Each structure stands twice: as structure tokens, then as C-alpha cells.
Amino acid sequence: MLLEETFKKVKRASKSLALLSDQQRNEMLLAVADAIIDQQDRILAANAADLAKMDQKNPLYDRLQLTEKRLADIAGDMRNVASLPSPLGHVTKEKTLPNGLRLHRVSVPFGVIGMIYEARPNVTYDVFSLCFKSGNACVLKGGSDADQSNQASVALIHEVLQRFGVNPDVVTLLPATHEATGEMLNAVGYIDLCIPRGGRRLIDFVRDTARIPVIETGAGVVHTYFDKDGDLEMGQKIILNAKTRRVSVCNALDSLLVHLDRLEILGNLVMPLASKHVIIYADDQAFAALDGKYPYLQHAAADSYDTEFMDYKMNVVTVSSLDEALAHIDQHGSGHSEAIITQNEQTARQFQAHVDAACVYWNAPTSFTDGAQFGLGAEIGISTQKLGPRGPMALEEITTYKWIIEGEGQVRP
């Protein structure tokens, strides 16, 4: 293993994090946040070099791009993480056994967390802030598209850590190669948990290849159901925001399900999307309702309903009942985020009870599926699995626990 020595260094460095107080961690996070703003020209220059290699029409371009506003938001999220209570040292269960043994279950870091991600340089900062705050070292494996951005970001973080006398190996960026990914996924004994963040191909590859524990995140085929009792004006705002706020993110809307009784207003419902040139792939009934009323209209293809578009594209599917909408989501959903727009509380509660997803919304857009929006400071990913964390993963979700047992000489009979 060519990177084994690198992994050993990270593992050794992770032990030193236990010596830091929460106050010290917070001071360093605030210092990194300040450095992001103070040295934004350096970060943006590296990002511009990455952007120059990508076609602006590529759906990943938006994910790759950093701006002064996005860097300010990143720094703000890091300051927010610093302000949160420490997730470490919490006694989550305690009891005294009949024999007098005292048991405490206490929250502790995982140790070393590996993160695999694609053209998302903001993830570098999110992962660092959450891992550092929770006492975890992190091994970062970014994509080649964002390599210069990631290198500049990690170099900045290292400079701050060294200024505070902290071993910079607690944040390590691997080469942006497929070989590095393979070694990372086989780093048994060095990496305690791997979190892939990206499209379905990446998630599937990591799950099928890894010999270390993995939490699946990210890939989202997201639906919104506009019910027969949905409000038109509310629906217009929610659908526009869910689809176009940022089309390249995993919580963006992919399929709009519309009740058959509301087809007469479908043109009005989706018309705000035309201002963003969103292409609609419609089934036969929806196509007939929109023909001549919506400018960017195409027939849905056989595989449209299983597509995470990450682009200005969206399906429109006609359903005759709530049950039919639920069946469609059951078949094509990815367990990420789903929404219903309705003024009927009974229908909404039935939808929320039935839908099997990490986040289920009523009269709100799926764009809110985000750790910062949930008040978690930031997120390391959005888990779509059921074993372990589910939904936005932040500080609590990247800790584990150990049992502390105290006795007075008791022995087991």
C-alpha cells in the first residue's frame, strides 16, 4: 500500500486531538474562518484554475465554483460550528448494577474519518470543521476537478494549525487519483469510517469496494407531490425554489407529481420555471396539458423517472390519487428528501407517515435538507441509509460512544 505511511501518520495525529480542549478547538476554527476571508484571493485563484478546465455547461460547474459570497458563507458556517456545544464527553446512559458496578456510556470521536467527494471544494471546509470540533482526524479524497481548490484550502488550514502547535496531519488530502481512492477504501486499521459524498456511481463504487465501514450519503432522486388540495401560489414558490435554487445539489427537485384534478392549472403551476429555462419531461397527460403553454417541453423518456438531473431539467408525472403518488415515490425515490404540497392535513400526515425517506416535507421545499439549515452548523453529508445516522450528519452523527465502568474490587461469579 503506497499510502500506508500517510495513513499511519493520520492515525497517530488523531490521538493528539484528545489533548485539546473544546475552547482550543473553537479558537482554531475561528482562526481558519478568519483566514478564509483574509486569503480569499488565494483560494479564488486556485478555484479559477479548476474552473478553467471545466465546461461551464457542465452541471458540476456550479458545485465547483467558489465566490466571495460562498466563501463568506463557508466562514460563517465554520464560526457557527465553533459556537455549538461540544458533542464529546456526554453521558448518554448511566446505571449502577446490583453488584455495585457503576456504568456510564460516554460520547467519543470515531478517530479517523475518510471523506470521498467530487467537484465540491466547500466540502473540504465542512468536513474539517465538523471533524475537528468532534475530535476526529480526517482523510480527504477530492476529485481531480477540484484538486487545486482543495490543495489551497488544506494548505490554509495547515498553516493555521501549525500556528497553534497542532500536528497538521489531522487533516490530510490524498492525491486526486483512482488509485488513492482504492487504497483509502482498504485502509483497515487506519480509517474508522468512510463517507462518500457524490453521485450514484460514486456511492455504489464505494459501497461495493470498501473494506472499512461506510455510511451512504448524497444521491437524491427527489419528488414533490402537488395534491388536489394544493395551493397554486404556494406551489409555484416551492417548486421554483426546490428546482432552481441550486440545481446541482442533491436536494434539488427531480420529479413533480401532479394530481389529475389539477392538470388545468399545471401551466400556471410550472410557468415560473420558464424564467430559468427548465426543461420539463412530461408524461402523456401532463404533456397534453402543457403543450402550447410551456416553452421548454419534451416527452418523458423511459429512464427519466430514475434520473438525478443536477441540471435545469425536471419530470412532471400525472397521478390520480395519493396512493398512486406514494407508489411512484416508493418505486423511484432514493430515500433522500420528498415533499407534499396540500392544504389537507390528513393527506399530509398520511404522506409523511408512508414515505420512506430521510426528510419528508409538508408545504416546504426540499432545498431545506441541509445541516446548516437544520441548525447543525454544517454537514458532512446526508445519510440515505437507515442503520446509524439518517438525514443531515453533523457533530453528533460523527461521534460514537464507549462504556466507562467503575468498581471496587467486584469479580464475576
Image (cartoon, rainbow, N blue to C red):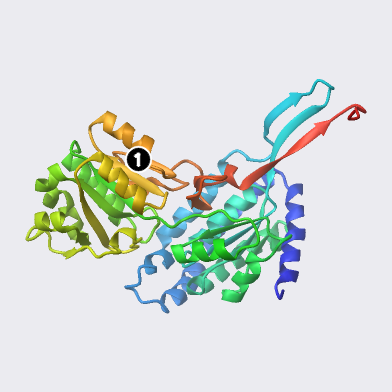
* Position of residue 301 measured from the top left corner of the image (x, y, whole percent): 24, 65
Furthest residue to the top? Answer: 98
Whether residue 288 sits left or right of residue 54 in the image: it is left
Disc tally is: 1
Q: Which residue is mark 1?
A: 361
The amino acid pointed to by label 1 is Tyr
Locate residue 150: give its quadrant. bottom right
Furthest residue to the right? Answer: 409
Furthest residue to the bottom? Answer: 53
In the depicted view, which residue is nearer to us: 403 or 399? 403
Whether residue 73 sits left or right of residue 207 in the image: it is left
Furthest residue to the left? Answer: 292
Whether residue 51 sits left or right of residue 242 in the image: it is right
Whether residue 311 sits left or right of residue 132 in the image: it is left
* Position of residue 17 measured from the top left corner of the image (x, y, whole percent): 73, 51
Identified at 42% across, 61% down, the residue is: 68
Q: Which quarter of the rendering shows the C terminus? A: top right
* Position of residue 129 measured from the top left corner of the image (x, y, whole percent): 58, 52
Q: Secondary structure at mark 1?
A: strand
* Position of residue 82 measured from the top left corner of the image (x, y, whole percent): 58, 45
> Would residue 30 be visible to someone looking at this image?
no
In the depicted view, which residue is nearer to us: 296 or 261? 261
Q: Which quarter of the rendering shows the N terminus? A: bottom right
The crowding category of the residue bearing disc 1, from other C-alpha atoms within 10 Å (few below 14, some 14 to 19, many at least 20), is: some
Identified at 43% across, 67% down, the residue is: 64
Identified at 81% across, 33% down, the residue is: 405
In the depicted view, which residue is nearer to us: 203 or 111? 203
> Would residue 198 be visible to someone looking at this image?
yes
